[in-house]
Image (cartoon, rainbow, N blue to C red):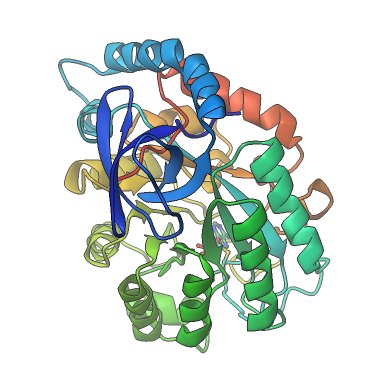
Amino acid sequence: MCYAIPGKVLEAQGNTAIIEYFGEKKKVRNDFFALSVGEYVYAQGGFIIQKISLSEALSILETWKELFFRLQEVDRELVQKETKTLYQKANSVRHKYHGNSCCVHGIIEFSNYCQCDCLYCGIRKSNTSVFRYRMAPEEITRSVEYAVKTLGFKALVLQSGEASWYTLEQLLAIVKEIQEKFPCLIILSIGEREIQVYEKLYQAGCRGVLLRFESSNSSIYEKMRPGHKLAERMDLIKKLKNIGYLIMSGFLIGLPGQTEQDIVEDLKVTDSLGVEMFSFGPFIPHPNTPLAKAPKPRMDVVLNTIAQARIKYPEAKILATTALESLGEKNALRLGLMAGANSLMVNVTPEKYRQFYEIYPQRIGVNEKTEERIPSLLKLLHSLGRAPTDLGL
Ligand code: SAH
């Protein structure tokens, strides 16, 4: 499976390298490997995450060769010359700045225990009707092995509710095993932990953090997340950025009390945090939360936000989220990708746990086997001329 194209090393010096794919050169960071010119590697999010043998690289490049240029052609044809609508304009900006590459990350939701009581969230601690699970460290690494070795993922988000049950030592052991045996870009999504925990995990090899600030309006934030302060969340995100992590962050669209102006501000704040990948999606009410009766936002509000983000912040990667797809309208993912989004995530949590990570009801992908979901996503991406790959910075 290919979620990245092998790159050939043209130059390697200290922590940086220049790699080349089908004539395109990219500058990437090399924190983990001894590299020689002529070797082949995989890069994700601007980091080299795997070295691969010459024979493997050549055979994968052979399968990509024709497809790569054909996909570019399809993408070019779908980009309108005259950009009449907001979405067409956003799509042409996406094409100009990012070409046809689309990041496809896997996500493993390894525990739904959470000590927070966010009003919007189905796994809030006060929801006693959800079955709670914790995957054992061996189960987590086995799932990573499957996602990397069998499914071909090169970047994985490890997500859980916020809980300190997993000790730093356990997390480090998991990360070290992944680094050694199933190398990939490891992205943490474990909520607010001490900065030292994040520092150690960075040293162990993690390079990404997914942590939304949820709302940049402090009165909404503090109402929605009892006991939490927006300034502390922001401060943590800034510190994570300073450590060197790639940051994925964003907000919820449609929280009670949120105005259009709040969304504009949320986008501005996402950008000002130096976020590499914008992750914002609709709030979907969960029946066992205080917001059970709150309305979900309209689909066009979410699509307009994607388009505005793309036009104002052209260099950012923008996720088409599972929540967007779960709003209940057909072709949501396609529409998101045609309104400026260029990244998506695939749920690779073991099927027996998936339904319990119920942050909101009727999540897309919960009742579908990963082995079926991946080909259908690839088919969609190919129909839009997108290469399911991340070509680095
Ligand atoms: N503990 C991690 C992961 C939290 S769950 C952390 O704190 O970052 C991941 C995301 O799900 C949250 O950041 C939130 O934005 C989203 N989420 C929670 N409840 C939701 C709902 N009802 N509708 C849509 N998204 C929701």
Q: Is residue 114 visible?
A: yes
Viewer-proximal residue among 193 and 224:
193
User: Considering only vertical position in the picture, is 2 above or below 142?
Assistant: above
Query: The N terminus is located in which quarter?
Result: top right
Q: Position of residue 43 (x, y in %)?
A: 42, 44
Identify which residue is drawn at 46% across, 40% down. 42
Up-down relation of residue 305 to residue 74 (above or below): below
Give the side of residue 69 with respect to residue 200, left or right.
Answer: left
Picture quarter containing residue 122? Answer: bottom right
21, above or below 178, in the image: above
Residue 75, by quadrant, is top left
Residue at image point 43% right, 67% down: 214
Residue in the image at 72% along x and 82% along y: 165
Residue at screen point 62% across, 66% down: 175
Q: Is residue 226 left or right of residue 130?
A: left
Question: Where is ligand 1, by quadrant?
Answer: bottom right
Q: Is residue 249 visible?
A: no
Instruction: Residue at the far bottom: name it.
Output: 227
For the C terminus, the image quarter is top left
Task: Please determine whether, in this image, residue 312 is positioned above or below residue 287.
Answer: above
Q: Residue 330: where, in percent of width, then height?
A: 55, 27
Left-right relation of 341 to 283: left
The image quarter containing residue 384 is top left
Q: Estimate the x, y position of residue 259 in percent, counting from the top left.
A: 31, 61
Q: Position of residue 231 (x, y in %)?
A: 34, 84
